[in-house]
Amino acid sequence: MAEPVAVAQPPGLFRRAWSFRQAKIGVALTAVVVIVSIVGPWAGPWITGFEANDFAGKPFKPDGIAGTDGIGRDVLTRFLAGGTSLLLYAALATALGVVLGAALGMLAGYSGGVLDSLIMRGNDVLMSFPQLVFALLAIAMIGPEGWLLVLVIGISHASRVARVARQATVTVVGNEYIRAAEMYATPRWLILSREVLPNITGPLMVELGLRLTYSIGYVASLSFLGLGIQPPAADWGLMINENRIALVVQPWGVLLPVLAIAVLTVGTNLITDSLASAAAGRGGKR
């Protein structure tokens, strides 16, 4: 009797994405910035001998490794301490937006009918407001609170994620495994979490990367405008605003955070592009 032939399982989304050279570069770039942001608050005082808010010298002087800012604080110390808040708020806002948007999109796509129309029309109303304007309006009314940054950016992301999740859900709800689950009277939430969600992870992972990239830009922009992280906290967006008036005489207060945000954005974009290519079934080069 012939032995059964084992059928090789196709590689998962992350393994396919990892086969792209740009994914490896993106992970490396992102990891560098993340490590600096995590280790920096403890390493900064050890390297420079100053805390983030200590007076280190005359304003805008090239003292120390990267000089001082407008009120005499050490630029390198503040740079090393300034990435934690940006990454934390961006990650929380992205998680909120993707989870909320995926839940609404799957519910709308699976239910159809009136519920689908209600969810998506409300979604259209949210999408009609530019994200940055929506954030500025909410912060102007309530104040620059950290939780508000996360909530506003997350909600603005959710409307866009919901459209992608709904479309992906519509393409799988007619499959036999969904019908089989319905025949056994499986609760809707179990069908969505066990049958639908695992089959739309590709588009959701792409959205996760995109929303994280946008969140980084939004949090940094709001801090630059004075509506995000507030002084005297160390924050990269705030550092750019505080030191821009002395860009010619003391550029490091602006260049260091700009370079860090740029590297982080490029890294997350490369990872997102790899996930999109893997989800589309394109092969990568090692």
Image (spheres, helix red, strand yellow):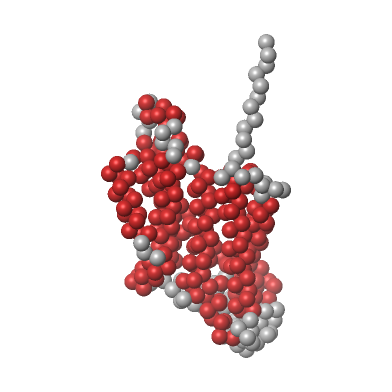
Q: Is residue 120 above or below residue 198?
A: below
Q: Is residue 94 above or below residue 226?
A: above
- Residue furthest to the right in view is 286
- Residue in the image at 34% along x and 40% along y: 111
Comparing 138 with 262, the one in front is 262
Q: Position of residue 130 (x, y in %)?
A: 40, 65
Q: Position of residue 25 (x, y in %)?
A: 68, 56
- Residue furthest to the left in view is 114
Q: Position of residue 170 (x, y in %)?
A: 41, 41
Is residue 111 visible from the viewing direction of this image? yes
Q: Is residue 54 left or right of residue 229?
A: right
- Residue in the image at 45% along x and 43% along y: 168
- Residue in the image at 61% along x and 45% along y: 282
- Residue in the image at 66% along x and 21% along y: 5
Number of labels in the image equals: 0
Q: Is residue 89 above or below residue 45?
A: above
Comparing 202 with 98, the one in front is 202
- Residue furthest to the bottom in view is 58
Q: Position of residue 15 (x, y in %)?
A: 63, 43
Comparing 244 with 272, the one in front is 272
Q: Is residue 113 left or right of residue 58?
A: left
Q: Is residue 233 above or below residue 172?
A: below
Position of the N terminus by quadrant? top right
Is residue 51 visible from the viewing direction of this image? no
